[in-house]
Amino acid sequence: MSVSMDCLFRPTSVAVVGASRTPGKVGYELLKNLIDGGFEGPIYPVNPSADDVLGLACYDKLEEVDPLPDLVVIAVPARFVPDVVDTCAELRIKAAVIVSAGFKEVGDAGAALEQRLTQTADHHDLRLLGPNCLGLMVPDAKLNASFAAKLPAHGHIAYISQSGALLTAILDVGAANQVGFSHLVSIGNKADVDELDLIRALGRDDNVKVIAGYLESINDGNAFVREADQISRHKPILLIKSGATEAGAAAASSHTGSMVGSEQVYESAFDRAGVIRCESVKQQFDLAQAFASQPLPPGERVAVVTNAGGAGIMAADAIERIGLTFAKLQDETKAALSEALPPAANVHNPIDVLGDALADRYRKATELALADANVDAVLVLLTPQAMTQGVETAEALVDVCRQSPGKPVFTAFMGAEHVAEANRVLRAGGLPVYDGPHTAVTALKAMADHARWRKRPQRVVKLFPVNRHRTELIIDRHLRRGQREIGEMEAKEVLEAYGFATPRGGTATTADQAVGLADQLGYPVVMKVWSPDISHKSDVGGVRVGLENAREVADAFDLMMYRIPAKAPGADILGVMVQQQCMTGMEVILGMKRDPRFGPLMMFGMGGIFVEVLKDVSFYLAPLTNDEARQMLKATRTYKMLTGARGSEGVDLDALAEALQRLSQLVTEFPQIQEMDINPFMIGPAGTTPIAVDARISVEE
Amino acid sequence: MSVSMDCLFRPTSVAVVGASRTPGKVGYELLKNLIDGGFEGPIYPVNPSADDVLGLACYDKLEEVDPLPDLVVIAVPARFVPDVVDTCAELRIKAAVIVSAGFKEVGDAGAALEQRLTQTADHHDLRLLGPNCLGLMVPDAKLNASFAAKLPAHGHIAYISQSGALLTAILDVGAANQVGFSHLVSIGNKADVDELDLIRALGRDDNVKVIAGYLESINDGNAFVREADQISRHKPILLIKSGATEAGAAAASSHTGSMVGSEQVYESAFDRAGVIRCESVKQQFDLAQAFASQPLPPGERVAVVTNAGGAGIMAADAIERIGLTFAKLQDETKAALSEALPPAANVHNPIDVLGDALADRYRKATELALADANVDAVLVLLTPQAMTQGVETAEALVDVCRQSPGKPVFTAFMGAEHVAEANRVLRAGGLPVYDGPHTAVTALKAMADHARWRKRPQRVVKLFPVNRHRTELIIDRHLRRGQREIGEMEAKEVLEAYGFATPRGGTATTADQAVGLADQLGYPVVMKVWSPDISHKSDVGGVRVGLENAREVADAFDLMMYRIPAKAPGADILGVMVQQQCMTGMEVILGMKRDPRFGPLMMFGMGGIFVEVLKDVSFYLAPLTNDEARQMLKATRTYKMLTGARGSEGVDLDALAEALQRLSQLVTEFPQIQEMDINPFMIGPAGTTPIAVDARISVEE
């Protein structure tokens, strides 16, 4: 496969099937772009009705091209494409780009055509990009196999786009901002090559420093997460993922299910894999230039150098607001700054070099800030005053950065024409350029977050000793009977098999039995109706809590037997469950919903009113490590309640994290489980046993 | 005063005191800018050591200028400035701009000099801008009384800046984006003319459509809010307020006090006055161009027209995420679109006119979208494809907008060089231009919010009949005795005087009395220690709740008398308070903290854990209208709990809003009250009486 991707990205020769002599036609523009791009290998136009195109001798058929090309670009009408692709396969050609439209995007007939392409690719060592795409560009290889525009400058940002139209805008913005690209790939319909193949190939390419992209969907979520996780460790991936408003699944059967949309799943997957999500092309460029040119900051403490007090204050505000730390300079640094700057200058952070600062003051202040052990990153602001030396300052900063390569430097020279040349110097010197403190700080925050992601502990998923067999029996029995919901009693058996404690209790079929059980358990007790047909027990009056004595238990039993048949006609009522009432601890909810693309998504939240009103829950993809389980707890707004707010003792966080990991193991080992809730899960202080009070599981083949 | 501001903004003649013959000097650059700007009235340089400057005859002294100038620009060293200003006053000159630095910003000596300027201005009909400022520009009057840069294009945006350096960047960005200005004012140290004077004058100027500014502080908060509120009704005010990290007041004595920072106060003041807060200069320009050129949207429903599916999806995401509504097109619109566009086009929102769309398709689609009664605003996206007619499309859109002036149209032509000319056409035609869907939607949201602000009901502050006299007695007594804290008992008396119900109960000095009281009230009761010296009663074990019978009451009394003296040595313990225990309703907190600039800031929050862990509170400036009190309730994240979550009955929202208004009346009528809490305030369903269970008030002369 790697060879095929090489043929796609770095072919030694290219054939264009459907080359045309008519300017404006795709087959003409493509060939012209290939030639104009300066591709150095042979280019073979293929078109039976022409002798030559754009000065190149034309072939009647692909078979006649000799030696065979590495890459075939196909621009014939959709209905002819499958035959051309079959020919490619027969000739053992390794890669083809199909720019032709008229496939899946136009309906069923097109989808059938596209299906043929996928099948051919699947059965041969042939990789297809497209159809319905703009093609691809590799500036370094002087390869412009697209009908988009002329080749951009060579650089280290690879861009893949599921929207061809967006690529043209991206090229244009890139050119205006001196952004160079290593690759530009229009993915099209993804009949064969998809985002996963591309990030895998780009991840291995040393010429690529940043992978950026625009995606509307991800085909194989699990594989994507695995691959992206590996790549993100050494190469940042910046994605715009649009289509957040995708319609959710029909009706959710669990609480967790009702809280999960595709948005949460993508967020969790990106979090897990270290993928940095961008909201707009502008922001993506802002981040890409930082990641492509600057080292990750060792921490979150930012120093600001400015020639305008107001800009410095704005930067300080932005730093605080976004959650970075405003650096406190060391005394030695302040002393050295006092030495180097005029008396009126501010030697505290933000370092104000004053409105009349020339390049030397900027150089000195930036050097000193970078040398300070309390500083992890420096933001240099400049407003163009009468005497300001924009270009010289830019040159000085480029120089300073070369000499102190360990910490990132960001610049925001504010203005337009007055700072344009200086900005060009900064960019050419590898310094990221922003239009103000706000955008610079946003980019810096993304880098700091990514640095933290890279430093996270090694992922080790702990495996707990469990009773898989018992779980398997219960699930299989339900599936055989066509029961999708596993009721409370058996759901708790499953949980017990995975090491959860559940309330003591039992079932009773008469009032006397119920009283006997309650006497054994000790009061107060909880009573619930026992019926395989009733899953929302409280809706039918099938839950009573706080029963204090034998009379209350007997009354509750008889009332349920009398009233529930009317409320749930036809339900098979087997009796009641009598359980000890859990009085201590905090109610939380643990849950899971399986996503068709990304697998089981775990949920944690504070129970009761918090989950219902505040939707205060956190998500993460299973399987969970201990660290990830702890992160899920911390990600809720009410985390403080777990650690002990209002002077009360905190809960046993280790036990809670372990419960999440055990649940994660259960849903990972049993893909039949589609959704489940443990709600409430009662968690008390360290030393007490947490209890899974109620649970619900839905299964599917 | 209006005459003086006229002399500042539209003088018929200008003198420059400190005019210099040396290029680079402020006195030279100023005069040169005045001349180069094309000022049409006489310009008088004043400098005793020169005969002429820049070809103009020079005066020795200001007194010699005849006729006297309307405006004097002062550029002499700081130590000479007060004398020049005195001369201006004696000559009855109406306005002066002091660009000289060396005043408050350099320390005490400078502050003393500045004080003299303020005094002179206060005692004469003379308005001073500055000192330590760049000056001002009024392009329409060809007045460039600054040493900043050359005059920008004339337009309808007025900009005032407390940072001179920022103004130069703003001028530069403005020029690059074809933004015209009506005024540019560098405020400097605000010795006399401040932001309030300026917004007042600019508010009255019909030439100004938008007031924008950068402020670090606001001098008179109350007056600012009053004035800004009036102006915002017809002219938007867009401000960057920096310096959010201002240090708070020392130690707060109330719960409310501890939650209020200067940030909340400014947020509330801006909310109240309809001022639109911006985070960056870029965002401010993005909003200013929209407000200056487009009508406010009648509602929040946005239609999108695009030639690229991906861009349309990004816009849809952005619209949803920011809280606008994605418009549902009427059937007639869809039918007309089907008629007008090719079959492959998408006639649902986002309307996809396809990649090969020329100007006519854009014209038709935008016209139809604007005509749809379900659409309040239209966002037009364009990516530059090979055949795209950028400029013609821009012209078509300008034309469409002229013909349908009632709804705003926003554009985001994505790219750089390929769309530059089209963007120029759009801007020249009065259409706001954005770099992508995200920024366009952000601006649109600001407009929709502002439109809603303008439609808010007339502010009517209800006055409740209260017992002011009783309150006055209590407050005066505390102030006379130097007691800053009003304890629970008397705080409740104050509340009762303002129509609040407090728990029934009384005081007891013996255990028997306490039991007698409890018997009368009915069990359970609450007992609290009664001491003027103990304000944190629970810290010393001075609060017991849920006392169920006479024995428990007697025991609790004796235990308090035995234990508290050891915990609070020296405290004067008068006995206990015995109160009915409020069992029903929800705990909320009502509070106020007085801000030195903006006056009383009201706070509302859900009580207990919600306010402590979630900090789920809302703020608004007193005095409150009923509508504003309701808005405060809605602004909390837990509002749903008030309306009845989990099937429970909601609380009496009218009573809660009334309580906030009564509290607002109390703190407005008694400026001695610095901070206060009613915590908890128990509010039940309609028909029950809400109870102020505990309260604390701090007063000051």
Image (tube, coloured by chain):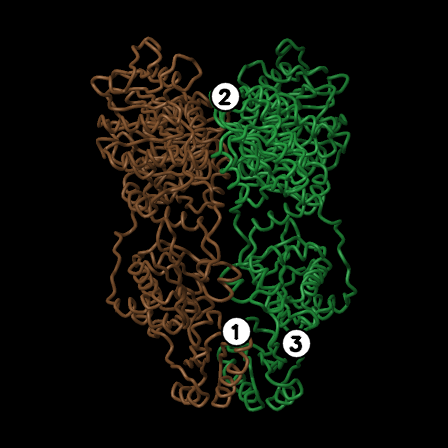
Chain colours: A brown, B green
- Spatial distance from mark 2 to mark 3, Cα to Cα? 69 Å
Q: Secondary structure at mark 2?
A: helix
Mark 1 closeness class: few <14, some 14–19, many ≥20 residues within 10 Å: some
Q: Secondary structure at mark 3?
A: loop
Q: Quadrant of residue A224?
A: top left
Task: Tell me which amino acid carries mark 3.
Answer: Pro
Q: Position of residue A111 (x, y in %)?
A: 40, 36
Q: Is residue B98 visible?
A: yes
Can you say whether B317 is above or below B472 in the image?
Answer: above
Q: Are marks 2 and 1 on the same chain?
A: yes
Q: Which residue is mark 2?
A: A417
For the residue carrying disc 2, how many other residues have a C-alpha within 10 Å: few (<14), some (14-19), or many (20+)? Answer: some
Closer to us: A530 or A454:
A530
Please name which of the two marks, 3 or 1, marks the residue nearer to the observer: 1
- Residue shown at the point (38%, 26%) measured from the top left: A99
**Among the 4 quarters of the image, the one containing residue A648:** bottom left
Answer left or right for B567 relative to A467.
right
Same chain for the residues under marks 3 and 1 in the image: no
Instruction: Name the residue carrying label 3.
Output: B503
Name above or below for residue A141 compared with residue A652.
above
Q: Is residue A388 above or below residue A601?
A: above
Estimate the spatial distance between the alpha carbons at disc 2 and disc 1, rounded to whole Å. 75 Å
| Position of residue B633 measured from the top left corner of the image (x, y, whole percent) | 63, 58
Same subunit under labels 2 and 3? Answer: no
Q: Observer-nearest residue: A526 or B49?
A: A526
* Residue under pointer 1: A568
Which amino acid type is shown beneath numbered disc 2? Glu
Left or right of B227 on screen, residue A380: left
Helix, strand, or loop for circle 1?
Answer: loop
